[in-house]
Image: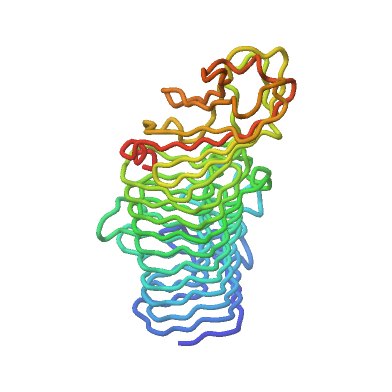
Amino acid sequence: MTLENFSILTSADGFGAVGSVGCYAIRVVDNVERTRICGLNIDGRHYGAMGFCVGISISWSNHGFYQNNNIQNCSVGIHGGGSFNVIDGNICDNHFVDDPDNFTNEWDSTSMYWDGFMFEGIKYSAITNNTATNNGQSGIYFGGGGSSVSCYNIISGNIANWNFNHGIDNGVSGTQSATNDVYGNTINGNICKNNRYNGIWLGTVHDIVVNSNIVVIDEEHKTKFNSAGDSSGIGLRLNTTKNCVVSDNDVFVTANEFSSIYFRGVGNVLGDNRIRGKDIIVENLITNNSAKGLTGTFKPTIAVGSGVTLDSTATRGTYSINNNKIVYDLDLNITTSSSTGPLQLSGFPFLASGTIYQYLGQCPFTSGMKTGFYQGNIGVNVYANNSVVTIAAMVTGVSTDIGTYLGNTVRMRIKLEIIMNAADFEGTFN
């Protein structure tokens, strides 16, 4: 069957629900082979109230080709299952997010606004170069539907922005089982911007690869959704996942968000991602995860220091993690007023996550110290409780408080390399 290059204007006119569809613009019935639907324009609310309308339903069709369809105002733009299908270059927008009145109350399952693309029981298919925006649930969703398996799909080159739930969503609804599961998908090269909860969400899934995606949450997100750092505002989230690989992604969020990446599961690998704005949050629940090439930025703070102030704008820190080795680089800009006593810094990500096996602290540059004092006389130590780093003066080989040696304006560059006990630190990434 081939359908190409025409328009369908329809409406459910307030009727229907998620379990009882009011109307389908196009419905491909079970086990149809080699359907081609391309270049259609579909409006699911041509008149009347918003009802439960599905733009294109391709449940259990195989070897189909669905390309360049523009689907507006449908509860679900494309609902799909089956195997070896190509869903490419389509646009699905049900305009839920366009009207702020729609989300003054929390979304629930009685809503007429659901996912842009909803895939349940889809296998070995390519979902590429599609656009999902402003939808009432997720932009592009893969699930088991309670009684099916979605697996081994390629999800690549898509744009999923401004959706009310997640941008790209791989998650099992109900209880995971052999007949209700999501696994083996590859999420590659997508752009997810300013989705309400998570740019990319993996929930109770396994063996998913997430790489080379761009996830952004900027200030417009807060303006639109009024998120204030609660459960909203996470760039990329793994929740109770198993054996997933998350690598080479760019995750940029504002400092007001919950986290850039939230990581929880068993046997996962997190590596070589670039993050900005907020640190990664890792829950200590399940073990045997690892991190490689994990980098980020942070702002150290003064834990102890009399008469000492850090310039919060100029002071900055970076960290990198490779397995059980952490390297911190600090650029400290300090002002003082009759400073005395010790100087201790806190706020180091992951520092308190396990037992330190060994460390090396250095101060390769300093300026503004009192006359006769230079960087070779500065020691960097980690306290036994791992929560603070001490900057000390080394006087005739003896560590002493640095406060009296600080000038009015001091700049220090600190490098701290730490080897954590591998068994303890492995538990950080779980």
Task: Name the residue: 50% across, 58% down.
Answer: 248
Looking at this view, name the residue that lies furthest to the right.
408
- Placement of 76 over or under 194, stated as above or below: below
Task: Name the residue: 50% across, 78% down.
Answer: 66
- Placement of 233 over or under 248, stated as above or below: above
Residue situated in front as seen by the camera: 331 or 89? 331
Q: Is 214 left or right of 16, judged from the image as shown?
A: right
Looking at this view, name the residue that lies furthest to the front.
396
Q: How many marks are shown on the rendered structure?
A: 0
Task: Name the residue: 58% across, 26% down.
Answer: 378
Q: Is 385 left or right of 333, judged from the image as shown?
A: left
Residue situated in front as seen by the camera: 252 or 351? 351
What sort of colour scheme is used for the picture? rainbow
Q: In the picture, residue 10 is in which quadrant?
A: bottom right
Q: In the picture, residue 82 is in which quadrant?
A: bottom left
Image quarter in which the N terminus is found: bottom left
Q: Is 167 left or right of 207, judged from the image as shown?
A: right
- Placement of 150 over or under 224, stated as above or below: below
- Residue 228, horizontal then vertical, whole percent: 60, 36
Looking at this view, name the residue that lies furthest to the left.
178
Residue situated in front as seen by the camera: 93 or 417? 417
- Residue 312, horizontal then vertical, whole percent: 68, 30
Task: Name the residue: 37% across, 79% down.
Answer: 62
- Residue 202, horizontal then vertical, whole percent: 42, 53
- Residue 71, horizontal then vertical, whole percent: 58, 70
Image quarter in which the C terminus is found: top left
